[in-house]
């Protein structure tokens, strides 16, 4: 039997955001089976701030990448993501099954070095001051530049898959911390659908306790 469907907030869809690369479809299918009369609206974030949208009430819950400011929020860490380096297909690194970040020290990063501290702390171009400014660009544009052999990017595997091209290769990289995906919602949100969705994400059966 489906879960008993909540009486609160049933006039509107239950809006759940998700960061790029997160694949919430499996949870949506379980929700639809258990709550067929309660619509679930999955909202891709793109470049928007999911935490800000939760705080503003634009989303009930959101799948986000940690770390985030948890003030006023609950957050369940869900899983870790493997970091990879994305290089042009003809780049020497493309031949590796796995590479350590120390072996990328002489590469040019097409990202803010602050987003990859493990690379920043050993990068030749940072240490000797030869690094030239990288124009602000989205990940899709950065991967296009990688394909042109203009440099590398280091991202979670899920984002590399999202922006996959035939002319680039994603190679797992060691020495870079994994990223973690979590589910967040407001502490003051009393909508019963929040607890139902938590149960879905945590893999509870329809008849299991919601504790």
Image (cartoon, rainbow, N blue to C red):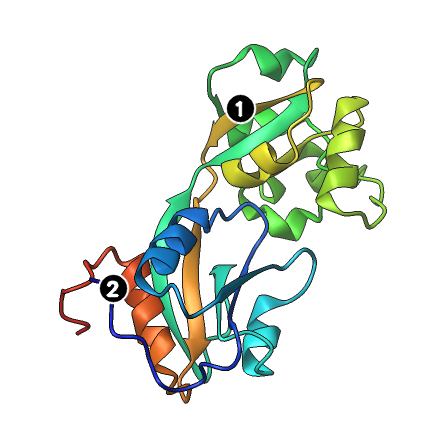
Is there any visible trace of residue 18 in the rendered image? yes
Which of the 4 quarters of the picture holds residue 95? top right
Q: Residues within 10 Å of mark 1 (few under 14, many from 20)?
A: many
Which of the 4 quarters of the picture holds residue 142? top right
Secondary structure under the numbered disc 2 in the rendered image? loop
Q: Residue at x 33, y 56 (%)?
A: 33
**110 or 66, nearer to the observer:** 66
Image location of residue 208, percent across then percent down: 14, 65
The residue that label 2 is drawn on is 2
> Quadrant location of the C terminus?
bottom left
Image location of residue 120, percent across then percent down: 62, 43
Q: Residues within 10 Å of mark 2 (few under 14, many from 20)?
A: some
Q: Height in image: 170 above or below 118?
A: above
Residue 39 as seen in the image, left or right of residue 159? left
**79 or 173, nearer to the observer:** 79
Residue 94 as seen in the image, left or right of residue 3? right
Secondary structure under the numbered disc 1 in the rendered image? strand
Q: CA distance from mark 1 to mark 2?
A: 42 Å
**71 or 37, nearer to the observer:** 37
Q: Which mark is residue 171?
A: 1
Image location of residue 72, percent across then percent down: 45, 85
């Amino acid at each position: 039997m489906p879960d008993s469907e909540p009486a609160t907030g049933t006039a509107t869809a239950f809006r759940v955001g998700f960061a790029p690369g997160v694949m919430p479809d499996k949870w949506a299918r379980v929700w639809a089976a258990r709550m067929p009369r309660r619509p679930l609206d999955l909202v891709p974030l793109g470049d928007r701030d999911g935490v800000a949208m939760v705080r503003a009430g634009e989303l009930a819950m959101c799948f986000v990448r940690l770390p985030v400011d948890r003030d006023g929020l609950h957050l369940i860490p869900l899983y870790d993501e493997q970091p990879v380096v994305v290089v042009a297909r003809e780049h020497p690194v493309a031949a590796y099954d796995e590479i350590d970040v120390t072996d990328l020290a002489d590469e040019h990063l097409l990202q803010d070095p602050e987003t990859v501290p493990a690379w920043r702390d050993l990068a030749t171009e940072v240490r000797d001051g030869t690094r030239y400014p990288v124009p602000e660009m989205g990940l899709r544009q950065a991967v296009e530049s990688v394909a042109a052999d203009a440099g590398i990017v280091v991202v979670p595997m899920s984002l590399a898959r999202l922006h996959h091209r035939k002319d680039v290769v994603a190679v797992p990289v060691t020495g870079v911390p994994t990223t973690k995906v979590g589910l967040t919602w407001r502490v003051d949100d009393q909508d019963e659908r929040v607890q139902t969705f938590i149960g879905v994400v945590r893999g509870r059966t329809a008849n299991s306790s919601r504790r």
